Image: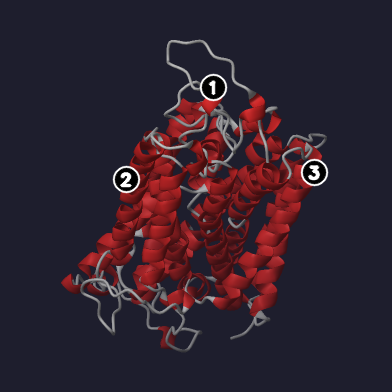
Amino acid sequence: MSVNWGGLVAVIIFYIIILAIGLFAARKTRGKTDSEDLMLAGRNIGLVVGIFTMTATWVGGGYINGTAQSVFDSGLLWAQAPWGYAISLVLGGLLFAKKMREQGYVTMLDPFQQKYGERMGGLLFLPALSGEVFWSAAILSSLGATVSVILEINLELAVIISACIAVFYTLFGGLYSVAYTDVVQLICIFIGLWICLPFSLTSEYVEPIVDTSTGWLGEWDSKFTGVWIDYALLLMFGGIPWQVYFQRVLSSKTAARAQILSFVAAFGCIIMAIPSVLVGAVARGTDWNMTDYGKDVENSNIVLPLVLQYLTPPFISFIGLGAVSAAVMSSADSSILSASSMFARNIYKLIFRQKASEREILWVMRIAIFGMGILSTILSLTINSIYGLWYLCSDFVYVVLFPQLFCVIYFEFCNTYGSLAGYIIGLFLRLGGGEPLLSLDPFIKYPYYDEKDGQLFPFRTFCMIISFISILSVSHISRCVLMGVDRKWDVFLCVTNIPESTKYSMDDPVELDSKETKGDQLPEPVIEEPAHKSTEELVKSDTYIE
């Protein structure tokens, strides 16, 4: 395989364009020392830019490359991610966008830390972090696949350079840079793919996709019905509890606009998947031995860049490869920013340094951006399957975080005991099912387990449901039990969080003695329920004790 000099020049040109736009957008944060400006762009994202950046929540490098790979490998029947993530945006808009935006949260973890305490919120940061890291790794992996087709250079070097560029402009511009580069990202993907399709579809090396529909549409095997259902539900509900999604929701001017952006972005996800599906179908019906590539495709990760390079004229290939490569690179920024925002605010500030200044938080956030970039790059170079990474990033988020988010928003009686129980039980059951991508062998063999095909039971959904039931049941039981015992047994101070000396009837006026109040939560004048004041108020309150 020789170097595609035209593709190389195109990649460089489009990289420069993305970098320039990212740095230009960063000017909006110049002179501002408020960390929320960097995280949420001052909650002032416009409608048009908001639609683009919300759509880009999912439509990025992993999306276009992963969809083409899935259609090529297993057929359209198993390419569930496009419509699965589109439905997740609709559900997110209906169930969570309005409630989260109306409360004025800064990150997705805020409601957890307000209700369950800072330390439980810190524990929930781990699955949220894993999701963002795997998502960024999937994007960088797809970028490496594209660059490997264009150049005969060290793959690791190409991925590292691309990650550095994305980290660089995110470091200075925050969500402003992410949002504005998202606009260019989607335009590049849309134009880059659609301009190549007429040529690839009519290539002399490609059979008409109508004649090869049996292959690229896929075949149904009833043996894997449980697996198909499991992945479908994972994408629909596991696509909701993401900081990368809620960062867009919380940056909207109003709650109503946050919902509108979610609904429009869902439609955008479907539209943007169409060219990738067609590219996968074209690749499936191509006689690759007759092309300049000269051999069968062994690594399905690279089918999209292969189609762009070998089935289109040089000039069209120039535009397609350059635009797609730049778009893939720019789509890594949002996950890196999201995880860094959660770490700086919900871990560093609210757990370790409650009195940290805004300038200090900004620097911690920038250091975290570097760390996230390094971690994502390492994973992208060690796990081969783009589509596998794509599924894996939603896996633990679905099992652990979705039931937690639903309960904290919709069930007032849920408390720290229930949250911790659901977290541990859900995580244990999920790890018990094993994970081939992480070389983790199963130690729990669910019904219909097969030594060759692995878990055929929808065990991820089972784990999520058990976690959900555990949160509700343990919260209710602990509330009933602890209300009748001495408050010293309430370890988390989330049920009997009012001292004995200040107990009162609902009709009596009361003054709380701040010296006797301890714990992560400030009591309100209802014995049965934990407090619901904002985390910022807790940090500044005289009654807050570390």
Tell me if mark 3 has few (under 14), some (14-19) or many (20+) residues whose alpha carbon lies within 10 angstroms of its own.
some
**Residue for point 70% across, 43% down:** 349
The C terminus lies in which quarter of the figure? top right
Left or right: 29 as drawn, with respect to 528:
right
What separation in Å lies between label 2 and label 1 (alpha carbons)? 29 Å
From the top left corner, tell me how far across and down residue 299 is, in percent.
Answer: 46, 81
Q: Amino acid at mark 3?
A: Glu
Q: Quadrant of residue 146?
A: bottom right
- Up/down of 320 relative to 102, above or below: below
Whether residue 245 is visible to the viewer of this picture, yes or no, is yes
Give the residue pinned by disc 1: 502
Q: Secondary structure at mark 2?
A: helix
The residue indicated by pointer 2 is 473
Report the label total: 3
Mark positioned earlier in the residue sequence (2 or 3) = 3
In the rendered image of this protein, does residue 508 appear above or below residue 113? above
Residue on which the image places disc 3 = 360
Tell me the mark number nearer the camera, choosing from 2 and 1: 1
The amino acid type of the residue labelled 2 equals Ser
Label 1, residues with CA under 10 Å away: few <14, some 14-19, many ≥20: some
Q: CA distance from mark 2 to mark 3?
A: 41 Å
The amino acid sitting under disc 1 is: Thr
Q: Nearer the viewer, mark 1 or mark 3?
A: 1
Left or right relative to 366: residue 399:
left
How far across and down, in percent of the image, does residue 342 sit? Answer: 62, 47
Q: CA distance from mark 1 to mark 3?
A: 38 Å
Q: Nearer the viewer, residue 283 or 220?
A: 220
Q: Residue at x 60, y 36 (%)?
A: 106
